[in-house]
Image: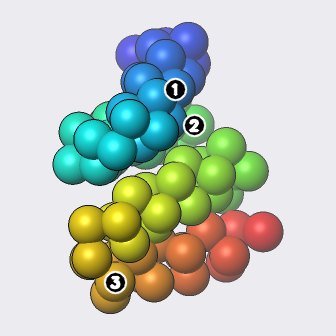
Amino acid sequence: YSRKRQMCIRDRGNCLQKMERYQESIECFVESLRIHKKIDGTRNTSDYANVLNNLGIASMEIKQYEKALSKFKEGIAIY
């Protein structure tokens, strides 16, 4: 795993989100978070929090409000 791969997957998720392909973007964000954790061994970085925020937004768009709130809360705890 590499940081560049993680960032590319995150950015792909951002693009899919803009295209309103929310389920696909969620899959990218989840994969990005998984790789990030493997690389850093921690979740306490601003990049991790940003991906959580993006995941929350995508979840909200498909009416998964509880999941969205959970991701926002997790991201806020990092900041």
Amino acid found under the numbered disc labelled 1:
Asp
Q: Which class describes the residues within 10 Å of circle 3: few (<14), some (14-19), or many (20+)?
A: some
Q: Give the quadrant of residue 40.
A: top right
The residue tagged with tag 3: helix, strand or loop?
helix
Q: Residue at x 68, y 76 (%)?
A: 76
Residue 35 picture location, percent across and down: 40, 32
Residue lying at the far right in this picture: please name it.
79
Amino acid found under the numbered disc labelled 2:
Asp
Q: Nearer the viewer, mark 2 or mark 3?
A: 3
Find out whether the residues at labels 2 and 3 contact each other: C-beta distance under 8 Å. no
Q: Is residue 1 above or below residue 78?
A: above
Q: Going from the N terminus, do you reach mark 1 or mark 2 first? A: 1
Q: Residue at x 34, y 83 (%)?
A: 65
Q: CA distance from mark 2 to mark 3?
A: 29 Å
Q: Which residue is mark 2?
A: 40
Q: Residue at x 38, y 35 (%)?
A: 19
Residue lying at the far front in this picture: please name it.
19
Q: Going from the N terminus, do you reach mark 2 or mark 3 first? A: 2
The residue tagged with tag 1: helix, strand or loop?
helix
Q: Going from the N terminus, do you reach mark 1 or mark 3 first? A: 1
The answer to whether one can see residue 53 in this image is yes
Q: CA distance from mark 1 to mark 2?
A: 19 Å
Find out whether the residues at labels 1 and 3 contact each other: C-beta distance under 8 Å. no
Q: Which residue is mark 3?
A: 65
Instruction: Work out whether residue 73 or residue 34 is closer to the camera in this orientation and state it.
Output: 73
Q: Across the whole image, how many numbered discs are drawn on residues?
A: 3
Mark on residue 11? 1
Instruction: Work out whether residue 24 or residue 9 is closer to the camera in this orientation and state it.
Output: 24
In this rendering, would 35 be left or right of 76?
A: left
Q: Which class describes the residues within 10 Å of circle 1: few (<14), some (14-19), or many (20+)?
A: some
Amino acid found under the numbered disc labelled 3:
Tyr
Q: Is residue 67 above or below residue 15?
A: below
